[in-house]
Image (cartoon, grey):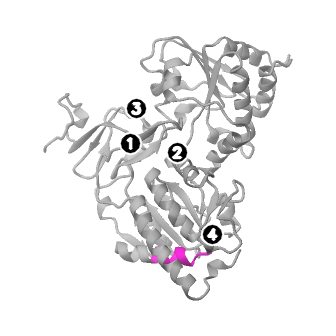
Amino acid sequence: MHIFSTDSSPLSPSATDAAALTRDWVCPFCPLLCDDLVAASYDDGTLAVPDTECSRLAQALAQYRATDAQCACVVDGRDVDLDAALARAAQCLANARRPLFGGLATDVAGTRALYPLAAACGAILDHLHGDALTPATLALQDRGSFFTTLSEVRARADLLVFFGCQPSRRYPRFFTRVLAGTDFARELVCVGCEADPAADGFAPTRIDTLLPDADPFDTLALWSALAEGRNASAATELASLQVRMAAARYTVVVYEPAALPAPHAALLIEALNRIVKAVNRSTRAACLALGGDDGALSVNQTVTWLSGLPLRTRVSMPARAAGAAALDHDPHRYRTARLLAAREVDALLWIASFAPDAWPTSLDPALPLIVLGHPALADAARARGANTVFVPVATPGIDSGGHLFRVDASVVLPLSAARGAALDTVASLAARLSEQVSEQVSGQMNGQASPREVQP
């Protein structure tokens, strides 16, 4: 068996059976976008990253099989060819009055291609992780934010404050990315949570825990008062932290939107931004939000470029719905769970290219469902039966190239295919669907009135 390698360096024993190696591979399965990995693609279609400490990556790679390239399209429980699946999907979208594009687990190119398709059929756009993404967006819209990058954290931050989160639970390599190989002294303070065990062993660091069981809203109310110079005599531990922040060269407050209590997480994020803003009057400080999984950050950024509005927006060609705005953003009304529960949409296009994340279990069996998804979703699509179209897609970074925004929202990294199975990309399929839907909609408008022209 021949081994392909990009250099002549020795291969680890676990990699010597690999059919192909991709060095400096960018992992697409979490928003840290670790780019220091070696991906091994085996003859049986499976993949591995030798010697990785990331359990999340290992679990993601375990979902890929030798049969992925042979995965068939599915319509109403039966295997069909691609043309038949796309024709049925286009018909569903053209006839829908208010479709929802959900999941949206794709990359920049996929989002760019989905946007004109959404405009052609007047779709609402929401991401799988919209509930975590929206509070941070609301806080940014209302108060602004001081943000930083992973490089800044690694090179400059001497005080890291973790509010209500243990990063390694969802992002196993976080501390490796920001602490490993650095040699200047840092202080790590965990507020409202226990210390993350993964932070141990990175010297020289001092780790403290403050108020692990306190109510987060009470904590931030007192902390905000202290940051603004007001008296809060009962908050001695927070007062000590505020003194440390004032003395630090560069403080970074790390939080995870998905770990904050709903439904008022935006208020907590606003408070953190307000504290950081106050600190910046005398020294440097910033926030780092850990989120954007499954392309959420990339999709949100791209939709904002294209429309001027973030996710949870309905987009429509002006001529498609008389009297309706071409763009309508509502972070509460256009939440996937609410829309499905209230039966306010009449078709769902579900995008799941990074993992076999199935559509919501509460989905009405009668609601037309179109899935552009991971090959592992094929069996679930067959089991749903009627009113279901499934088309397998390539995962960016596994079977196709692509681009994703990193967690710090300031760096876009290119993805290289580690395996390259013959699967269509979300971008190519969305482009074909857009063309077919536009043709059908045009025919409807030139003929008799379409039911889509009736306002819900």
Tell me where the magenta segment starts and ends, as one range.
Answer: 88-97
Q: CA distance from mark 3 to mark 2?
A: 19 Å
Considering depth in this image, is 119 or 61 the residue closer to the camera?
A: 119
Is 233 situated left or right of 319 in this image? Answer: right
Q: Amino acid at mark 3?
A: Glu
Q: CA distance from mark 4 to mark 2?
A: 32 Å
Q: Give the main secondary structure of the magenta stretch.
A: helix
Callout 1 touching callout 3 (CB < 8 Å): no
Q: Which residue was labeled with disc 2?
A: 293
Q: Amino acid at mark 4?
A: Pro
Q: Secondary structure at mark 3?
A: loop
Q: Nearer the viewer, mark 4 or mark 1?
A: 4
Q: CA distance from mark 1 to mark 2?
A: 16 Å
Q: Residues within 10 Å of mark 3 (few under 14, many from 20)?
A: few
Q: Earlier in the sequence, mark 3 or mark 2?
A: 3
Q: Residues within 10 Å of mark 2 (few under 14, many from 20)?
A: many
Q: Amino acid at mark 1?
A: Pro
The residue sitting at the bottom extreme is 448
Q: Earlier in the sequence, mark 4 or mark 2?
A: 2
Q: CA distance from mark 3 to mark 4?
A: 51 Å
Q: Secondary structure at mark 4?
A: helix
Q: Which residue was labeled with disc 3?
A: 53
Q: Nearer the viewer, mark 3 or mark 2?
A: 2
Q: Residues within 10 Å of mark 4 (few under 14, many from 20)?
A: some
Q: Which residue was labeled with disc 1?
A: 414
Is 110 situated left or right of 157 in this image? Answer: left
Instruction: Measuring from the top left, give residue 393's x and y in whole percent.
Output: 39, 60
Q: Which residue was labeled with disc 4?
A: 318
Which residue shows up at 52% across the image and 45% down it? Answer: 293
Instruction: Measuring from the top left, give residue 302's x and y in whole percent.
Output: 53, 50
Q: Nearer the viewer, mark 4 or mark 2?
A: 4
